[in-house]
Image (cartoon, grey):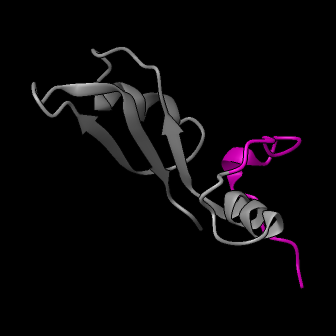
Amino acid sequence: MSEPTIPFLFQKSVALSSYRDRQFRGSEGDQDKKLLQSTTLYVGNLSFFTTEEQIHELFSRAGDVKRIIMGLDKTTKTPCKSKKFVYFCSY
């Protein structure tokens, strides 16, 4: 079996984080393969005033951004501080 390809964003990384999702159904090796193939990035702890355009400008430096998801507060319908995901294009 060949080694999984590493997305452009993570090619310079040395190793995966030691964090493991306890809800993942599969072996640790399976989880590592999925992480190495992932094109989704969770971004947290940003200012409430961070715009989608600012996130796009920053992360487009690492690769082609496919989509940005910004969670909204249930009550105020304003962007949440910690619910942002950046999806990169995969080639």
Helix, strand or loop: magenta stretch: loop
Q: Position of residue 62 (x, y in %)?
A: 60, 39
Between 85 and 21, the one nearer to me in the picture: 21
Tally of marks: 0
Q: Residue at x 72, y 63 (%)?
A: 31
Position in image of residue 55 (x %, y %): 40, 30
* Magenta segment boundaries in residue numbering: 1-20
Residue 67 pos. (x, y %):
36, 51
Q: Residue at horizontal 65%, vertical 52%?
A: 21
Tell me if 28 is positioned left or right of 75 in this view: right
Foreground of the two, 24 or 43: 24
The residue furthest bottom is 1
Q: Is residue 89 above or below residue 77?
A: below
- The N terminus, quarter of image: bottom right
Image height check: is 64 above or below 42?
Answer: below
- Please tell me in which quadrant of the rendered image residue 3 appears: bottom right
Horizontal arrangement in the rendering, residue 23 relative to residue 84 (left or right) = right
Comparing 62 with 48, the one in front is: 48
Up the image or down, 19 lies above or below 4; here it is above
Asked which quadrant contains residue 2, the reply is: bottom right
Image coordinates for residue 74, horizontal then vertical, percent: 15, 34
Residue lying furthest left:
76
Determine the image quadrant of residue 90. bottom right
Q: Quadrant of the C terminus?
A: bottom right
Residue 13: say if magenta.
yes
- Is residue 89 inside the magenta stretch? no
At a point 36% along the width and 14% down the height, the residue shown is: 47
